[in-house]
Image (spheres, rainbow, N blue to C red):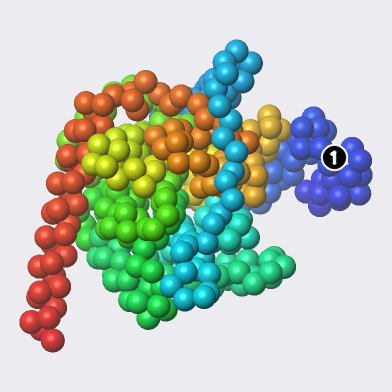
Amino acid sequence: MVKCFFFIDFYPSLTNDCTSPLRLLLSICCSLELIKMMPFKELVEALRFGCTSSFWRMTLHWTYSLVFSYINLLTQTMFTQKSVYHQCVVSPLPPITSDKRLPICIITGATSGLGAAAALALSKKGFYVVLAGRSSHKLSKVMSDIRSQSEEEVQLKAFEVDTSSFSSIMRFKESLEQWLLESDMHPSIQLLINNAGIYALTSRLTTEGHHDQMMGTNYIGPFSLTQVLLPFLKNSPVPSRVINITSFTHRNVSSFQADKETVSGKCLSKFKHYPCAEIYEYSKLCMLLFSYELHRQLQGSGSQGVSVIGVDPGLVKTNIMREVPWCIRQLAFIVLQFLGFLQSPELGVSAVIDAALAPPETSGLYFFGGNGRTVESSALSYNMKLSRELWETSCDIFQDSLLNYSKVSVSSEKVD
Protein backbone atom coordinates (compact mmCIF):
# COMPACT_ATOMS: atom_id res chain seq x y z
CA MET A 1 0.00 0.00 0.00
CA VAL A 2 2.74 2.46 0.95
CA LYS A 3 4.60 1.65 -2.28
CA CYS A 4 1.47 2.45 -4.32
CA PHE A 5 1.07 5.88 -2.73
CA PHE A 6 4.82 6.52 -2.97
CA PHE A 7 4.71 5.83 -6.73
CA ILE A 8 1.74 8.19 -7.25
CA ASP A 9 3.49 10.98 -5.32
CA PHE A 10 7.01 10.41 -6.70
CA TYR A 11 6.02 10.21 -10.39
CA PRO A 12 3.40 12.97 -10.74
CA SER A 13 4.04 13.34 -14.49
CA LEU A 14 2.71 9.81 -15.00
CA THR A 15 -0.16 9.92 -12.51
CA ASN A 16 -1.40 13.49 -12.09
CA ASP A 17 -4.03 13.17 -14.83
CA CYS A 18 -7.26 11.89 -13.22
CA THR A 19 -8.07 10.06 -16.46
CA SER A 20 -4.68 8.32 -16.61
CA PRO A 21 -5.15 4.52 -16.82
CA LEU A 22 -2.00 4.14 -14.75
CA ARG A 23 -3.43 6.30 -11.98
CA LEU A 24 -6.69 4.35 -12.09
CA LEU A 25 -4.82 1.05 -11.75
CA LEU A 26 -2.64 2.35 -8.91
CA SER A 27 -5.61 3.85 -7.08
CA ILE A 28 -7.53 0.58 -7.30
CA CYS A 29 -4.47 -1.34 -6.07
CA CYS A 30 -4.10 1.03 -3.10
CA SER A 31 -7.79 0.72 -2.30
CA LEU A 32 -7.59 -3.07 -2.45
CA GLU A 33 -4.64 -2.98 -0.05
CA LEU A 34 -6.66 -0.82 2.34
CA ILE A 35 -9.64 -3.15 1.99
CA LYS A 36 -7.42 -6.05 3.15
CA MET A 37 -6.71 -4.09 6.32
CA MET A 38 -10.40 -3.41 7.04
CA PRO A 39 -12.05 -5.09 10.04
CA PHE A 40 -13.95 -8.28 9.16
CA LYS A 41 -17.27 -6.73 10.29
CA GLU A 42 -16.93 -3.86 7.81
CA LEU A 43 -16.12 -6.27 4.98
CA VAL A 44 -19.23 -8.30 5.78
CA GLU A 45 -21.34 -5.12 5.75
CA ALA A 46 -19.86 -4.15 2.36
CA LEU A 47 -20.60 -7.60 0.91
CA ARG A 48 -24.11 -7.46 2.32
CA PHE A 49 -24.77 -4.07 0.73
CA GLY A 50 -23.25 -5.29 -2.55
CA CYS A 51 -25.92 -7.98 -2.72
CA THR A 52 -28.85 -5.55 -2.37
CA SER A 53 -31.03 -4.26 -5.20
CA SER A 54 -30.21 -0.69 -4.12
CA PHE A 55 -26.50 -1.25 -4.80
CA TRP A 56 -27.16 -2.50 -8.33
CA ARG A 57 -29.69 0.26 -8.92
CA MET A 58 -27.06 2.83 -7.94
CA THR A 59 -24.40 1.11 -10.06
CA LEU A 60 -26.42 0.60 -13.24
CA HIS A 61 -29.50 2.83 -13.25
CA TRP A 62 -27.84 5.91 -11.77
CA THR A 63 -24.90 5.67 -14.15
CA TYR A 64 -27.30 5.36 -17.08
CA SER A 65 -29.34 8.39 -15.98
CA LEU A 66 -26.17 10.47 -15.54
CA VAL A 67 -24.87 9.51 -19.00
CA PHE A 68 -28.32 10.19 -20.46
CA SER A 69 -28.31 13.69 -18.92
CA TYR A 70 -24.93 14.51 -20.49
CA ILE A 71 -25.98 13.10 -23.87
CA ASN A 72 -29.12 15.22 -23.64
CA LEU A 73 -26.97 18.26 -22.89
CA LEU A 74 -24.56 17.50 -25.76
CA THR A 75 -27.38 16.92 -28.26
CA GLN A 76 -29.05 20.13 -27.21
CA THR A 77 -25.80 22.11 -27.59
CA MET A 78 -25.12 20.70 -31.07
CA PHE A 79 -28.57 20.68 -32.64
CA THR A 80 -30.74 23.28 -30.91
CA GLN A 81 -30.57 27.00 -30.25
CA LYS A 82 -31.45 26.72 -26.55
CA SER A 83 -30.35 29.76 -24.54
CA VAL A 84 -27.34 29.83 -22.26
CA TYR A 85 -28.08 32.07 -19.28
CA HIS A 86 -25.27 34.31 -18.12
CA GLN A 87 -24.88 35.45 -14.53
CA CYS A 88 -26.32 38.81 -13.54
CA VAL A 89 -24.56 41.27 -11.25
CA VAL A 90 -25.73 41.19 -7.62
CA SER A 91 -27.26 44.56 -6.73
CA PRO A 92 -27.61 45.93 -3.18
CA LEU A 93 -31.07 46.46 -1.71
CA PRO A 94 -32.58 49.98 -1.61
CA PRO A 95 -30.99 51.67 1.45
CA ILE A 96 -32.96 52.64 4.55
CA THR A 97 -30.13 54.96 5.53
CA SER A 98 -27.04 56.00 3.60
CA ASP A 99 -25.60 52.48 4.04
CA LYS A 100 -26.01 49.92 1.28
CA ARG A 101 -27.70 46.67 2.33
CA LEU A 102 -26.58 43.32 0.99
CA PRO A 103 -29.16 40.85 -0.34
CA ILE A 104 -29.66 37.89 2.01
CA CYS A 105 -29.07 34.31 0.90
CA ILE A 106 -30.02 31.30 3.06
CA ILE A 107 -28.27 27.99 2.33
CA THR A 108 -29.31 24.77 4.06
CA GLY A 109 -26.87 21.89 4.46
CA ALA A 110 -24.06 24.43 4.64
CA THR A 111 -21.73 22.46 6.93
CA SER A 112 -19.81 20.84 4.04
CA GLY A 113 -19.81 19.93 0.36
CA LEU A 114 -21.98 21.90 -2.05
CA GLY A 115 -23.53 24.02 0.71
CA ALA A 116 -20.16 25.24 1.97
CA ALA A 117 -18.90 25.81 -1.60
CA ALA A 118 -22.04 27.81 -2.45
CA ALA A 119 -21.65 29.89 0.71
CA LEU A 120 -18.07 30.78 -0.26
CA ALA A 121 -18.94 31.65 -3.86
CA LEU A 122 -22.06 33.70 -3.06
CA SER A 123 -20.42 35.62 -0.21
CA LYS A 124 -17.79 36.74 -2.73
CA LYS A 125 -20.58 37.71 -5.15
CA GLY A 126 -21.98 40.20 -2.65
CA PHE A 127 -24.60 38.28 -0.65
CA TYR A 128 -25.05 38.32 3.12
CA VAL A 129 -24.94 34.54 3.49
CA VAL A 130 -26.94 32.79 6.20
CA LEU A 131 -25.60 29.27 6.74
CA ALA A 132 -28.06 26.70 8.10
CA GLY A 133 -26.97 23.27 9.29
CA ARG A 134 -27.32 20.66 12.02
CA SER A 135 -23.91 21.22 13.67
CA SER A 136 -22.98 24.62 15.14
CA HIS A 137 -19.36 23.48 15.40
CA LYS A 138 -19.17 22.63 11.69
CA LEU A 139 -20.94 25.86 10.76
CA SER A 140 -18.35 27.86 12.72
CA LYS A 141 -15.54 26.02 10.95
CA VAL A 142 -17.08 26.71 7.51
CA MET A 143 -17.43 30.42 8.34
CA SER A 144 -13.83 30.52 9.51
CA ASP A 145 -12.67 28.81 6.29
CA ILE A 146 -14.69 31.23 4.12
CA ARG A 147 -13.20 34.26 5.86
CA SER A 148 -9.68 32.89 5.48
CA GLN A 149 -10.25 32.33 1.73
CA SER A 150 -11.78 35.76 1.11
CA GLU A 151 -9.58 38.76 0.36
CA GLU A 152 -12.34 41.23 1.22
CA GLU A 153 -14.62 41.24 4.26
CA VAL A 154 -17.64 38.95 3.83
CA GLN A 155 -20.93 38.99 5.74
CA LEU A 156 -21.91 35.64 7.30
CA LYS A 157 -24.41 34.40 9.86
CA ALA A 158 -25.07 30.85 11.05
CA PHE A 159 -28.15 29.14 12.49
CA GLU A 160 -28.43 25.58 13.76
CA VAL A 161 -31.39 23.86 12.06
CA ASP A 162 -32.41 20.30 11.24
CA THR A 163 -34.56 20.42 8.09
CA SER A 164 -36.07 17.01 8.88
CA SER A 165 -37.63 18.46 12.05
CA PHE A 166 -40.62 20.81 11.71
CA SER A 167 -40.09 22.25 15.18
CA SER A 168 -36.46 23.02 14.27
CA ILE A 169 -37.63 24.77 11.08
CA MET A 170 -40.10 26.90 13.07
CA ARG A 171 -37.44 27.82 15.64
CA PHE A 172 -35.14 28.81 12.78
CA LYS A 173 -37.86 31.03 11.28
CA GLU A 174 -38.40 32.74 14.63
CA SER A 175 -34.65 33.22 15.18
CA LEU A 176 -34.22 34.60 11.66
CA GLU A 177 -37.09 37.04 12.18
CA GLN A 178 -35.59 38.20 15.47
CA TRP A 179 -32.13 38.61 13.94
CA LEU A 180 -33.45 40.70 11.05
CA LEU A 181 -35.31 42.92 13.51
CA GLU A 182 -32.40 43.35 15.92
CA SER A 183 -29.95 44.00 13.04
CA ASP A 184 -32.24 46.73 11.65
CA MET A 185 -32.43 44.84 8.35
CA HIS A 186 -35.29 44.68 5.88
CA PRO A 187 -37.70 41.82 6.86
CA SER A 188 -37.05 39.90 3.67
CA ILE A 189 -34.71 37.42 2.02
CA GLN A 190 -33.61 37.36 -1.59
CA LEU A 191 -32.32 33.82 -2.13
CA LEU A 192 -33.19 30.47 -0.55
CA ILE A 193 -31.13 27.43 -1.54
CA ASN A 194 -32.65 24.14 -0.39
CA ASN A 195 -29.48 22.06 -0.46
CA ALA A 196 -29.71 19.85 2.66
CA GLY A 197 -30.02 16.16 1.90
CA ILE A 198 -29.05 12.68 3.12
CA TYR A 199 -28.68 9.16 1.72
CA ALA A 200 -29.76 6.70 4.42
CA LEU A 201 -29.21 2.96 4.11
CA THR A 202 -31.65 2.03 6.88
CA SER A 203 -35.20 3.04 7.69
CA ARG A 204 -35.57 5.56 10.51
CA LEU A 205 -38.04 8.26 11.43
CA THR A 206 -37.65 12.01 11.83
CA THR A 207 -37.36 13.57 15.30
CA GLU A 208 -41.13 14.02 15.59
CA GLY A 209 -41.65 10.44 14.35
CA HIS A 210 -44.07 11.39 11.56
CA HIS A 211 -41.99 10.78 8.42
CA ASP A 212 -39.23 8.66 6.97
CA GLN A 213 -36.01 10.57 7.65
CA MET A 214 -34.73 10.56 4.06
CA MET A 215 -38.04 11.83 2.66
CA GLY A 216 -38.27 14.27 5.58
CA THR A 217 -34.80 15.71 5.03
CA ASN A 218 -34.72 15.66 1.23
CA TYR A 219 -38.24 16.81 0.43
CA ILE A 220 -40.79 17.44 3.24
CA GLY A 221 -38.29 19.64 5.13
CA PRO A 222 -37.40 21.82 2.11
CA PHE A 223 -41.11 22.14 1.22
CA SER A 224 -41.98 23.20 4.79
CA LEU A 225 -39.03 25.60 5.02
CA THR A 226 -40.01 27.23 1.73
CA GLN A 227 -43.62 27.64 2.88
CA VAL A 228 -42.45 29.21 6.14
CA LEU A 229 -40.01 31.60 4.43
CA LEU A 230 -42.20 32.45 1.41
CA PRO A 231 -43.56 35.65 3.07
CA PHE A 232 -39.94 36.87 3.47
CA LEU A 233 -39.26 36.14 -0.22
CA LYS A 234 -42.44 37.89 -1.34
CA ASN A 235 -41.61 40.88 0.87
CA SER A 236 -38.31 41.49 -0.95
CA PRO A 237 -38.02 44.92 -2.61
CA VAL A 238 -36.01 43.27 -5.43
CA PRO A 239 -36.64 39.99 -7.29
CA SER A 240 -36.11 36.95 -5.04
CA ARG A 241 -35.55 33.28 -5.80
CA VAL A 242 -35.90 29.71 -4.50
CA ILE A 243 -33.35 27.15 -5.70
CA ASN A 244 -34.10 23.47 -5.11
CA ILE A 245 -31.18 21.08 -5.44
CA THR A 246 -32.28 17.92 -7.21
CA SER A 247 -30.52 15.06 -9.01
CA PHE A 248 -30.28 13.17 -12.29
CA THR A 249 -31.44 10.12 -10.30
CA HIS A 250 -35.04 11.39 -10.62
CA ARG A 251 -34.99 10.03 -14.19
CA ASN A 252 -35.18 6.47 -12.84
CA VAL A 253 -38.68 6.94 -11.41
CA SER A 254 -41.23 5.60 -13.88
CA SER A 255 -44.34 6.02 -11.70
CA PHE A 256 -45.15 7.75 -8.43
CA GLN A 257 -48.19 7.96 -6.15
CA ALA A 258 -48.43 11.37 -4.47
CA ASP A 259 -50.48 10.15 -1.50
CA LYS A 260 -49.64 10.80 2.15
CA GLU A 261 -48.39 7.28 2.82
CA THR A 262 -45.85 7.48 -0.02
CA VAL A 263 -44.73 11.10 0.43
CA SER A 264 -44.24 10.70 4.18
CA GLY A 265 -42.51 7.34 3.67
CA LYS A 266 -44.94 5.47 5.95
CA CYS A 267 -45.60 2.93 3.20
CA LEU A 268 -42.00 1.69 3.58
CA SER A 269 -42.95 -0.51 6.52
CA LYS A 270 -44.29 -3.14 4.10
CA PHE A 271 -40.82 -3.67 2.58
CA LYS A 272 -38.57 -6.36 4.02
CA HIS A 273 -35.47 -4.38 3.01
CA TYR A 274 -35.33 -0.59 3.01
CA PRO A 275 -35.25 0.53 -0.68
CA CYS A 276 -32.81 3.39 -0.10
CA ALA A 277 -31.99 4.05 -3.76
CA GLU A 278 -35.66 4.27 -4.76
CA ILE A 279 -36.50 6.55 -1.82
CA TYR A 280 -33.67 8.88 -2.75
CA GLU A 281 -34.95 8.98 -6.35
CA TYR A 282 -38.50 9.71 -5.14
CA SER A 283 -37.27 12.58 -2.96
CA LYS A 284 -35.41 14.19 -5.87
CA LEU A 285 -38.39 13.79 -8.22
CA CYS A 286 -40.56 15.42 -5.56
CA MET A 287 -38.16 18.38 -5.43
CA LEU A 288 -38.58 18.88 -9.18
CA LEU A 289 -42.36 18.49 -9.15
CA PHE A 290 -42.47 20.96 -6.26
CA SER A 291 -40.21 23.43 -8.12
CA TYR A 292 -42.39 23.43 -11.24
CA GLU A 293 -45.66 23.64 -9.30
CA LEU A 294 -44.42 26.46 -7.04
CA HIS A 295 -43.33 28.32 -10.18
CA ARG A 296 -46.84 27.96 -11.64
CA GLN A 297 -48.51 28.92 -8.35
CA LEU A 298 -46.44 32.10 -8.02
CA GLN A 299 -46.94 33.09 -11.64
CA GLY A 300 -50.68 32.50 -11.37
CA SER A 301 -51.03 34.50 -8.15
CA GLY A 302 -49.21 37.52 -9.57
CA SER A 303 -46.08 36.98 -7.42
CA GLN A 304 -43.73 37.17 -10.41
CA GLY A 305 -41.10 38.74 -8.18
CA VAL A 306 -40.30 35.28 -6.76
CA SER A 307 -38.71 32.83 -9.21
CA VAL A 308 -38.11 29.09 -8.69
CA ILE A 309 -35.37 26.99 -10.27
CA GLY A 310 -34.43 23.32 -10.01
CA VAL A 311 -30.70 22.62 -10.13
CA ASP A 312 -28.83 19.37 -10.75
CA PRO A 313 -25.12 19.81 -9.91
CA GLY A 314 -24.27 16.42 -11.41
CA LEU A 315 -22.11 13.90 -9.58
CA VAL A 316 -20.21 15.70 -6.81
CA LYS A 317 -17.83 14.20 -4.26
CA THR A 318 -19.51 15.12 -0.96
CA ASN A 319 -20.31 13.40 2.33
CA ILE A 320 -23.87 12.47 1.34
CA MET A 321 -22.86 8.84 0.72
CA ARG A 322 -21.10 8.48 4.07
CA GLU A 323 -23.37 5.58 5.12
CA VAL A 324 -22.33 3.52 2.10
CA PRO A 325 -19.51 1.09 3.08
CA TRP A 326 -16.14 2.78 2.69
CA CYS A 327 -14.58 0.31 0.26
CA ILE A 328 -17.56 0.45 -2.14
CA ARG A 329 -17.65 4.23 -1.94
CA GLN A 330 -13.91 4.52 -2.54
CA LEU A 331 -13.87 2.23 -5.58
CA ALA A 332 -16.89 4.04 -7.03
CA PHE A 333 -15.15 7.41 -6.65
CA ILE A 334 -12.02 6.11 -8.38
CA VAL A 335 -13.90 4.72 -11.38
CA LEU A 336 -16.20 7.75 -11.72
CA GLN A 337 -13.26 10.12 -11.51
CA PHE A 338 -11.45 8.14 -14.19
CA LEU A 339 -14.55 8.41 -16.42
CA GLY A 340 -14.62 12.16 -15.86
CA PHE A 341 -18.00 12.24 -14.10
CA LEU A 342 -16.92 12.98 -10.53
CA GLN A 343 -16.57 16.66 -9.64
CA SER A 344 -15.26 18.46 -6.60
CA PRO A 345 -17.76 20.68 -4.69
CA GLU A 346 -15.90 23.74 -6.03
CA LEU A 347 -16.64 22.65 -9.63
CA GLY A 348 -20.06 21.12 -9.02
CA VAL A 349 -21.38 24.28 -7.40
CA SER A 350 -21.09 26.19 -10.70
CA ALA A 351 -24.60 25.11 -11.78
CA VAL A 352 -25.97 26.37 -8.45
CA ILE A 353 -24.26 29.76 -8.83
CA ASP A 354 -25.46 30.00 -12.44
CA ALA A 355 -29.04 29.47 -11.25
CA ALA A 356 -28.66 31.89 -8.33
CA LEU A 357 -27.51 34.71 -10.61
CA ALA A 358 -29.57 33.89 -13.73
CA PRO A 359 -32.11 36.45 -15.05
CA PRO A 360 -35.75 36.29 -13.79
CA GLU A 361 -37.07 34.64 -16.97
CA THR A 362 -35.30 31.41 -16.00
CA SER A 363 -37.99 30.60 -13.42
CA GLY A 364 -39.34 27.09 -13.91
CA LEU A 365 -36.23 25.79 -15.66
CA TYR A 366 -33.86 22.91 -14.81
CA PHE A 367 -30.17 23.84 -14.68
CA PHE A 368 -27.58 21.15 -15.37
CA GLY A 369 -23.99 20.99 -16.61
CA GLY A 370 -22.74 24.42 -15.55
CA ASN A 371 -21.97 27.37 -17.83
CA GLY A 372 -25.55 28.62 -17.53
CA ARG A 373 -27.00 25.62 -19.38
CA THR A 374 -30.42 24.03 -18.90
CA VAL A 375 -31.85 20.67 -20.01
CA GLU A 376 -35.21 18.94 -19.99
CA SER A 377 -35.91 16.83 -16.93
CA SER A 378 -37.84 13.54 -17.10
CA ALA A 379 -41.28 13.40 -18.71
CA LEU A 380 -42.81 12.40 -15.36
CA SER A 381 -41.48 15.57 -13.69
CA TYR A 382 -43.60 17.68 -16.10
CA ASN A 383 -46.82 15.82 -15.24
CA MET A 384 -49.03 18.70 -14.04
CA LYS A 385 -51.68 16.43 -12.54
CA LEU A 386 -49.04 14.64 -10.47
CA SER A 387 -47.41 17.91 -9.37
CA ARG A 388 -50.80 19.29 -8.23
CA GLU A 389 -51.51 16.09 -6.30
CA LEU A 390 -48.08 16.29 -4.66
CA TRP A 391 -48.67 19.96 -3.82
CA GLU A 392 -52.00 19.19 -2.14
CA THR A 393 -50.54 16.24 -0.22
CA SER A 394 -47.52 18.30 0.88
CA CYS A 395 -49.76 21.15 2.02
CA ASP A 396 -51.81 18.66 4.09
CA ILE A 397 -48.62 17.33 5.69
CA PHE A 398 -47.47 20.93 6.33
CA GLN A 399 -50.79 21.84 7.99
CA ASP A 400 -50.65 18.69 10.16
CA SER A 401 -47.11 19.57 11.24
CA LEU A 402 -48.15 23.16 11.97
CA LEU A 403 -51.08 21.95 14.08
CA ASN A 404 -48.88 19.51 16.03
CA TYR A 405 -46.28 22.22 16.58
CA SER A 406 -48.95 24.62 17.88
CA LYS A 407 -50.25 21.97 20.30
CA VAL A 408 -46.76 21.27 21.63
CA SER A 409 -46.06 25.00 21.99
CA VAL A 410 -49.31 25.55 23.93
CA SER A 411 -48.52 22.57 26.20
CA SER A 412 -45.02 23.95 26.87
CA GLU A 413 -46.45 27.35 27.78
CA LYS A 414 -48.91 25.74 30.25
CA VAL A 415 -46.06 23.82 31.91
CA ASP A 416 -44.00 27.02 32.23
Q: Amino acid at mark 1?
A: Thr
Instruction: Check the image and report above or below for 142 versus 314.
Output: below
Per the image, label 1 sits on a secondary structure element best described as helix
Residue 317, x across and y down, in percent: 60, 46
The image quadrant of residue 402 is bottom left
The image quadrant of residue 414 is bottom left
Residue corresponding to mark 1:
15
Looking at the image, the residue that sits furthest to the top is 79
Res 408 seen here: yes
Residue 131, x across and y down, in percent: 48, 64
Quadrant location of the C terminus in the rendered image: bottom left
Residue at 61% in and 20% down: 77
The image quadrant of residue 284 is top left
In the rendered structure, the answer to whether residue 277 lies left or right of residue 374 reads: left
Looking at the image, the residue that sits furthest to the front is 98
Looking at the image, the residue that sits furthest to the bottom is 416
Instruction: Check the image and report above or below for 38 versus 259.
Output: below
Residue at 53% in and 69% down: 100
In the rendered structure, the answer to whether residue 87 lies left or right of residue 164 reads: right
Residue at 35% in and 27% down: 381
Residue 209, x across and y down, in percent: 21, 57
Q: Residues within 10 Å of mark 1 (few under 14, many from 20)?
A: some
- Nearer to the camera, 309 or 51: 309
Res 197 seen here: no
Residue 324, x across and y down, in percent: 49, 45
How many marks are shown on the rendered structure?
1
- Nearer to the camera, 39 or 336: 336
In the rendered structure, the answer to whether residue 174 lies left or right of residue 142 reads: left
Residue at 41% in and 37% down: 363
